[in-house]
Amino acid sequence: MFESLGFENATAPQVAVWFALAIGVAFGILAQITRFCFRRMIDGTDRRQAAAVWLTALATAVIGTQFAVAQGLITFDDHRFMAAELPGLAILIGGLAFGAGMILTRGCVSRLTVLAGGGNLRAVLVLLAFAITAHATLKGVLAPVRTTLGAVTLPLENTALPGNGLIWAAVIALAAVAFALRSGHRATTLILAAVLGLLVPLAWVGTGYILLDEFDPIAMESLSFTAPASEALFFTIASTSIPAGFGTGLLGGVVIGAFAASILRAQFQWQSFDSPRQTGRYLAGAVLMGTGGVLAGGCTVGAGLSGIPTLSVAAILAIVSIGLGGIATRAILSASASESGGSTTTPKLQPAE
């Protein structure tokens, strides 16, 4: 469709960067206001409200995505989420590692990106370590880990949930909305979360239909943070030879949007580490998330908010594994704090909240 839009001095890949930048700015603003974060559902002080925000976003994401599929605008038949050979071991181990890492850093990657725009220097360092580790797992010294675990596959008869996609979307969305409405969260926050979720199908349709150019094709992408972090890192250090892509624009947009929202809401604040021990904990979490995000095929947004709406079995396995990794790590840390004589099993609130 791209050739019919009248662009004469820009290619589809170039327009995709600006499109991703706009999507990222919107996500950064909405995520900063709603405090959108998967980890908070597991280890936050307001888990029920955090779940309401995340599930509301998921509801509109899955409805919008499956509606676009039903209208024939996009298809996921050839997408990596629908690979006939499921790398189950890599997804399971990667998901558990990512879940553990997000508990250690007290924020999933999307949340940390938003916090970085708000002046959190801990989030900046974690994102840098995350991007380096992710790139090393994709193409560097940790690639053998990825290829070895990825070679253990399970053949799938159905790569997506069987049956009518719109019915599945309705079931998932109704369950999510039912929980959100019973959470007692403010209606305005839930409405903003619903708008945030609509960015997922907007990105899918934008890259998979509107910017579709047979002569200069681009990948069909939506919101994600693992591959974009690696891409943005590579672009930053080699921009004269590596052009910006959708991921670079998306990540940059999120930081800009979060920065603008934090300034306008008088919430911008410089924050850093309290001790060397804390620094080590956060770096360990960053490494776990970087490796885990690649092995699992995405983070809580890439495999979760964007992946679940595709109804992919691989994406569902990834987000479940991430959740289990987070729950297990939280239990271990709580038990450790209790044994060391701590007065409570609830971790002290950190700026990465």
Image (cartoon, grey):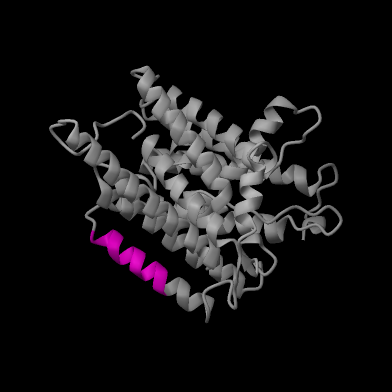
Depicted 119 relative to depicted 90: above or below: above
* Residue 232 locus on image (x, y percent): 65, 34
Which of 19/251 is in front? 251
* Residue 86 locus on image (x, y percent): 59, 65
Would you say 342 lies left or right of 186 here? left
Would you say 89 lies left or right of 175 here? right
Q: What residue is at 81 percent from the left and 52 percent from the top?
A: 6
Q: What residue is at 70 percent from the left and 40 percent from the top?
A: 139
What is the tally of numbered marks visible in this picture?
0
Which of 204/47 is in front? 47
Residue farthest bottom in this picture: 163
Depicted 327 relative to depicted 168: above or below: above
Q: What residue is at 56 percent from the left and 59 percent from the top?
A: 201
Let me know if residue 247 appears in the view: yes
Span colored in magenta: 171-182
Q: Quadrant of residue 310?
A: bottom right
Q: Is residue 148 magenta?
A: no
Residue farthest left in this picture: 343
* Residue 36 locus on image (x, y percent): 39, 45
* Residue 31 locus on image (x, y percent): 43, 42
- Secondary structure mainly formed by the magenta segment: helix
Q: What residue is at 22 percent from the left and 41 percent from the top?
A: 335
Q: Is residue 173 magenta?
A: yes
Which of 182/51 is in front? 51
Locate the C terminus by quadrant: top left
Locate the N terminus by quadrant: bottom right
Would you say 126 lies left or right of 45 here? right
Which of 52/21 is in front? 52
Let me know if residue 305 appears in the view: no
